Amino acid sequence: MDKNPKKIKEMFNQIAQNYDVNNNLISFGLHKIIKKNVINSFKFSGDCLDLCTGTGDIAELLKKQNCNVVGLDFSKNMLEIARKKHSDIKFIEGDCTSLPFDNNTFDNVTISFGLRNIENYDKALDEIYRVLKPDGYFLHLDFCKKNWFANIIYNFVVPKLIKIFYGNNQPYVYLVQSKKDFFDDDKLTEIFYKHSFEVNIQKTFLLGTISCKYCHKSQII
Ligand SMILES: C[S@@+](CC[C@H](N)C(=O)[O-])C[C@H]1O[C@@H](n2cnc3c(N)ncnc32)[C@H](O)[C@@H]1O
């Protein structure tokens, strides 16, 4: 798949205005419930960085846990909406593959439905490792493809719905394809391990369609 960062940025700038509405539609509102469940399952505290923050859903949930939160995204338009919705949260325009922070800055780094869109995900994971404090945690949330239910939903039902709602609208065609192409759960654990993240807790939702990994920064690199 073409995940050229310039194109991905343009695409999110293009869909930003309707991102929240469409997310609610496509997920039947479930994404909000899942995000809330994930963030409330873990006790977050201290300095938190939410990468690929989009319109700031995860940043808001972290803020509710009294964390000191920074949201980062490279889409101006997504950030504009995030800032309007959450005026009490600091949002920064930046790229996950080159984070504008010193080493060992954050207690937690989160990324929700983001890594799938990053061409150089190895670089992004290296950056996450670098900015995390030695005892820090990394939380990853996204679709995972190794599941018959997910395959039926995302290979047949969602594409049909998307075609009905949006015709051949490119961003939504991309969305379905990127879900199909993303790593399965075991491969993702392997990749995280390669980047010195140990998966401590793993949770799945919707019969394994969505997976969350709570990882500890390991000192072996
Ligand atoms: C599908 S949205 C997810 C938004 C939010 N985290 C959520 O769960 O609703 C993906 C976001 O990642 C951002 N993004 C993609 N690649 C990025 C990169 N290399 N650096 C920073 N942001 C990136 C996009 O601009 C977009 O806002």
Image (spheres, grey):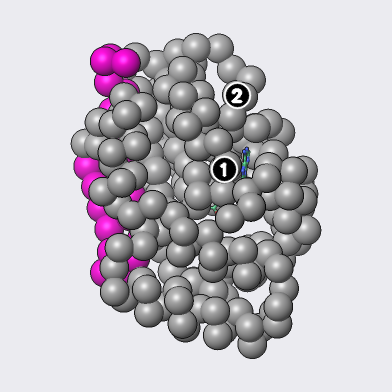
* Residue designated by label 2: 99
Using the image, determine if residue 4 lies above or below residue 198. below
Q: Which range of residues does the magenta coloring cover?
A: 201-221
Q: Quadrant of the C terminus?
A: top left
| Magenta residues, dominant SS class | strand
Task: Determine whether, in the image, residue 43 is placed left or right of residue 96.
Answer: left
Residue 4 is situated, as x and y percent measured from the top left of the image, at 68, 45
Q: Quadrant of the N terminus?
A: bottom right
| Farthest residue, direction left | 200
Q: Residues within 10 Å of mark 1 (few under 14, many from 20)?
A: some
Indicate if the residue with disc 1 has its beta carbon within 8 Å of ligand 1: yes
Circle 2: residue type: Leu
* Residue designated by label 1: 118
Q: Please tell me whether residue 138 belongs to the stretch shown in magenta.
A: no
Task: Determine whether, in the image, residue 194 is placed left or right of residue 77.
Answer: left
Residue 217 is situated, as x and y percent measured from the top left of the image, at 31, 23
Looking at the picture, tell me which residue is in the foreground, 210 or 7.
Answer: 7
Going 54% across and 68% down the picture, which residue do you hit? Answer: 176
Using the image, determine if residue 13 lies above or below residue 119. below
In whole angstroms, how far apart are the C-alphas of marks 2 and 1? 14 Å
Going 34% across and 35% down the picture, which residue do you hit? Answer: 192
Circle 1: residue type: Ile
Residue 165 is situated, as x and y percent measured from the top left of the image, at 66, 83
